[in-house]
Image: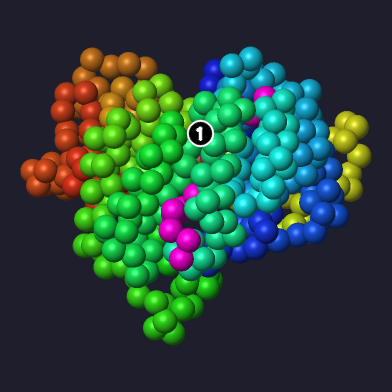
Amino acid sequence: MTELDKKTGLYIHFPFCVRKCNYCAFLSFSADEGVRREYAGALMREIELAGRSFSGQISTIYLGGGTPSVMDVSLLSLIIKKVRQCFDVAPDAEITNEANPGTLGIKDRVVRAKLTAYKYMGINRLSMGVQSMDNDRLHMLGRIHTAENVVRDFDIARELGFDNINLDLIFSVPGESTEDALDDAKKIIALGPEHISCYSLQLEEGTPFYEMAERGEITEVADEEDRGTYHRICGLLRSSGYEHYEISNFAREGRRSRHNSLYWNMDDYIGLGLGASGFTRGVRYRNTSDLSTYLAYYGGQDADGAEWTTERPLDEIHENTDFDNISEAVFTGLRRTEGITYEEALAAYGMSPQKDAAEQFWKIFRDAEDEAKRFADQGLLIIDDAGLRLTEEGIDISNSIMSLFV
Ligand code: SF4
C-alpha cells in the first residue's frame, strides 16, 4: 500500500471522440456504445485495483480525453461512484470534466439534462474545447461544433450553477492572422470563463494537418508571427483580468486549475485508463495504449485478491533518481510564471531546507550555470536570491532554457 502525498490527483482517460480533429495527436478514436461500455467496465476494475494500492486523500479528479462527455452519463456516474468507493476523495475536491461543445447534445433540453447529471455526480469544473469562435476555422480544424453551440452550452452550464469553467483556445491555425486569433480570444473573454488555456497549433506527425502541410495544401504559421500572436493574446488576457500563471494558462483570482498545478508542482497523481500517465512516490508510468490489451487485462481478471502491481499492462515505468526529480521539478516549475525556488528544487532532490540553497542548487547544475546566466543577461531568465523564472520573452525559447537542467 503506497501512502499518497497530501495533494494527490486522479486522472482518468476516456479515449473516445466523435471523430478525429485534423490536428489531433492525442490518444483518441471513435468507438461504438458497446466498446465504450466494455471500457467503462474495465476502467472500474482498474479503479478498484488501484484503490487497494494507495492510502491517503484524493484532492483533484480530472476526467480527460479524448472526450469524456461522449460517455453515456449513466456510465460516467458509475465510474465516479466507483472512484468514491475505492478512494478517499476530499470533500472539497476539484472534479473537472472535459465537456466538448457538440457532445453535450443537439437540443437544449438534452444539454441541460447532461450537465445536470454532471452536477449530481459532483463535477464542479468544466473544461470546454472551444478552440475558435469562427465557424470556418472550426470546420477547418475538424471540430464537430459551431461557435453557436459554444455559447449555448456555456450559458446552460452557467444557468445550472457551474461557476468554474475553462475554455480552450487554439491559435496559429494555418491561414489565421494575429487579428483573427485576437478576435477569437475577445469572444471567449466575453463569455467570462474563470480560466482560459491558449495553445499554439502544432503540426504533429501522423495528423491530417501534417500530411496536408507535406503536400503543400496548408502552410504552418511562421514562428515569428506565432510568437507575436502569443504575446498579444497574453496582453489581452492580462488586461481583461486574467492572471497569467503558466505558459499556456490564465485564470481569474483563485481559479487556477488545481489539478494541472499538481503536474507543475511535482505532486503525486494517479493515472487510470488507456494510455494514462501517473507519477506516484517518484515513479512515473504510462498505461498501455493498446485497447485490446487494456480490455483483456482489466476486463478479464478476477478482481478478488488481485493487485495493481507493475505486472499490469504498462507502456513505460521509470523510478526517478534524485537527479530526475530535481531536473523535472525545474523543468515543470519553469512553466509557472512564478518559476521555481531553490528550496523547492532541493526538496525534490531530497534535501532539507538549506541556508545556502542557491549555492547548493548551482552545485548540482554546475554545467548549466554559465549558459543560464547568459540567458539572464539577455533578459530571458530571471535568476535571483529565491530562484529562477522565465521572462515573457524567455517563454519563446522555453525549451532551450529548460533543457539546460535536464
Ligand atoms: S476532441 Fe480533442 S481529443 Fe478528440 S480528436 Fe479533437 S482534439 Fe483530439
Q: Name the amino acid type tagged 1.
A: Ile
Check the image and name the residue furthest to the left: 377
Magenta span has 336? no
Check the image and name the residue furthest to the bottom: 215
Q: Residue 366, how many percent across, how many down?
A: 22, 40
What residue range appears in magenta? 122-136
Q: Residue at x 38, y 46 (%)?
A: 187
247 displayed left or right of 288: left
Q: Residues within 10 Å of mark 1 (few under 14, many from 20)?
A: many
Is 397 above or below relative to 379?
Answer: below
Label 1, on which residue?
A: 165
Q: Residue at x 54, y 56 (%)?
A: 146
Quarter containing the N terminus: top right
Q: Residue 64, how many percent across, how many down?
A: 61, 43
Q: Residue at x 34, y 65 (%)?
A: 176
* Rendering quarter of residue 261: top left
Q: Residue 46, how many percent across, how many down?
A: 77, 39
Residue closest to the eye, 116 or 87: 116
273 displayed left or right of 6: right
- Camera sees residue 371: yes
